Amino acid sequence: MNTPQSREGNIIRYLVYFAVFIFTALVDDLAIKSSSISIWNIILFVIVASMCTLFYIYRYNREQRFFDSRFNVPWLSSYRLTVTLSLLVAGGRIGVSYLQLYHGMAASPLQNAYLAHASALLYWFMMVANGVVMPVLEEYLCTGFLFNYWFRAEQKSVAYLGILCSGLLYAALSFQFAPAFLACNVCFGMLFAWSYLSTQTIWMPIYLAALNGVLTMVTVVV
């Protein structure tokens, strides 16, 4: 029950992590969709997001003790892999912007939220909250905990299924349900999951997700 090998314990723990994430996302949504950005909403988000982040880090690091770490690869040890994946993420975001500008792809919920109450304070809050913090939490939930609990078996079929499930969950937690955005986010999520399996470290998908989040927020005002 107290280790990641316990199926019942995994279900309970994952539901707790999921609920914590949803609560943090609701606080973020409250802040960006208010008629004007409020310092109290920002403070509330900082408190909730900080508690969620520390909770995730503590739990993930604690659970990693139960797994073999001989195959962990420092995520910056292969500059070619890091640069290649970074370029893929940047290219993907450019592709989304191109579709929006020239092929009638709808604006994202984040773009609509910013355009409704555009201000410098709101933009920088969204850059930190939706560009960095929420993507980091998503990767702990959609990649780290997901693979720790359900896809640890060293089989290709398990890895492929895990990558697909991670991509689908990442897309769902991005709360962008238009078909085009959903498809793009599934691809991003699968790429992040693949990077995790390739390096066996959570830092690679966290870096890529944060890069994707920051580039997303840059395109909000473009």
Image: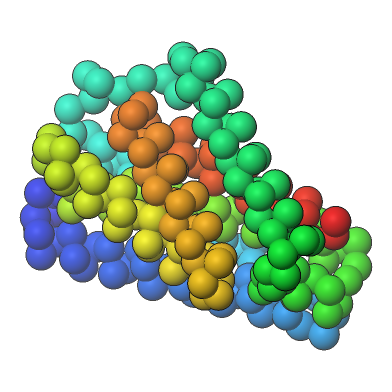
Residue occupying the point 31% across, 48% down: 163
**Picture residue at 66% right of the left edge, 49% below the top:** 95
Residue 114, quarter of the rendered image: bottom right
Along the line of sight, which residue is nearer the eye, 212 or 46?
A: 212
Answer above or below: position of 57 versus 219: above
Q: Position of residue 70 (x, y in %)?
A: 22, 19
Q: Position of residue 12 (x, y in %)?
A: 21, 68
Which of the two residues, 59 or 109, is positioned nearer the viewer here?
109
Question: In x, y percent, where is residue 176?
Answer: 55, 71
User: Can the viewer see residue 57?
Assistant: no
Residue 73 versus residue 23 in the image, above or below: above
x and y percent of residue 54 in the render?
Answer: 47, 50
In the rendered image, the vertical position of residue 109 relative to residue 100, given as above or below:
below
Closer to the camera in the image, 182 or 16: 182
Q: Who's the residue at 16% across and 38% down the image?
A: 156
Of all residues, the one furthest to the bottom in this rendering is 35
Would residue 213 be visible to someone looking at this image?
yes
| Residue sitting farthest toward the front | 103
The foreground one among 182 and 70 is 182
In this picture, residue 3 sits left or right of residue 205? left
